[in-house]
């Protein structure tokens, strides 16, 4: 989590609002059940629904509310986290000068690194490219450590320019992430 981002601020605010709703529900439903037992449905009117509440139906809903509430809590908080990640990626790209500059920087850094490979790096990478044999496990570990110590960037790191390109191609644009923050739209 990057706490000094707008994406994190939205995640934190909306997660807390939802958890406050869960606390309210866990307080209100038992109170409603008690009231229904003592005085029935007189004076009970639901917001945003027409018609009179059905006592039997309300009591059956109240008996099993924890399961649906738990599922909706998990789904909502996961959705908010997904939106946080997408929104944070947009912030990172913007921070680094926008899509084109972000991608160009990643490509330039990868090319620069590949051009500066020392003979020690080349020798160790060749050892790791040999067909794997169980008896040479110690040798592979030695050469891997040597590459890390020499500052070698492994292929997964060199895929960063490609990852940046795919991320940008997926068009995680500034406005698309806003619709993931569902609670914000109803505030």
Image (cartoon, rainbow, N blue to C red):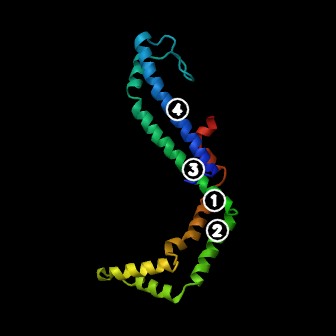
Which numbered disc, 1 or 2, marks the residue closer to the eye?
Answer: 1
Is the Cβ of the residue at disc 4 closer than 8 Å to that at disc 2?
A: no
Q: Residues within 10 Å of mark 4 (few under 14, many from 20)?
A: few
Picture mark count: 4
Location of residue 134 with respect to 163 vertically, above or below: below
| Residue where numbered disc 4 is placed | 21
Residue 27 in the image: x percent, y percent?
46, 26
Residue 132 appears anywhere in the view: no
| Residue where numbered disc 1 is placed | 92
Location of residue 113 with respect to 80 vertically, above or below: below
Give whichever of discs 2 and 3 has the lower sequence position.
3
Residue 86 appears anywhere in the view: yes
Give whichever of discs 1 and 2 has the lower sequence position.
1
Residue 131 in the image: x percent, y percent?
36, 83
- Image quadrant for the C terminus? top right
3D distance between C-alphas at marks 1 and 3: 12 Å
| Residue where numbered disc 2 is placed | 103
Q: Residues within 10 Å of mark 1 (few under 14, many from 20)?
A: some
Location of residue 68 with respect to 50 vertically, above or below: below
Q: Residues within 10 Å of mark 2 (few under 14, many from 20)?
A: many
| Residue where numbered disc 3 is placed | 84
Q: Which residue ends up furthest to the left in the rendered image?
A: 135
3D distance between C-alphas at marks 4 and 1: 31 Å
Location of residue 42 with respect to 14 vertically, above or below: above
3D distance between C-alphas at marks 3 and 4: 20 Å
Which numbered disc, 4 or 2, marks the residue closer to the eye?
Answer: 4
Residue at position x 49%, y 10% in the image: 42
Give whichever of discs 3 and 4 has the lower sequence position.
4
């Amino acid at each position: 989590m990057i706490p000094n981002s707008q994406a994190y601020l939205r995640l934190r605010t909306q997660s807390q609002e939802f958890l406050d709703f869960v606390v309210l529900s866990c307080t209100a439903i038992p109170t409603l059940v008690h009231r229904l037992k003592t005085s029935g449905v007189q004076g009970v009117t639901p917001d945003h629904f027409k018609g009179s509440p059905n006592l039997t139906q309300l009591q059956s809903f109240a008996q099993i509310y924890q399961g649906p509430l738990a599922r909706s809590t998990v789904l909502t908080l996961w959705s908010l986290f997904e939106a946080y990640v997408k929104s944070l990626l947009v912030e990172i790209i913007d921070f680094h000068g926008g899509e084109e500059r972000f991608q160009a920087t990643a490509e330039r850094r990868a090319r620069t690194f590949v051009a500066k490979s020392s003979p020690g790096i080349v020798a160790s990478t060749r050892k790791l490219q040999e067909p794997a044999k169980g008896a040479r496990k110690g040798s592979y570990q030695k050469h891997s450590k040597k590459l890390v110590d020499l500052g070698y960037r492994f292929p997964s790191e060199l895929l960063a320019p490609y990852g940046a390109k795919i991320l940008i191609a997926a068009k995680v644009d500034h406005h698309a992430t806003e619709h993931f923050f569902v609670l914000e739209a109803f505030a």
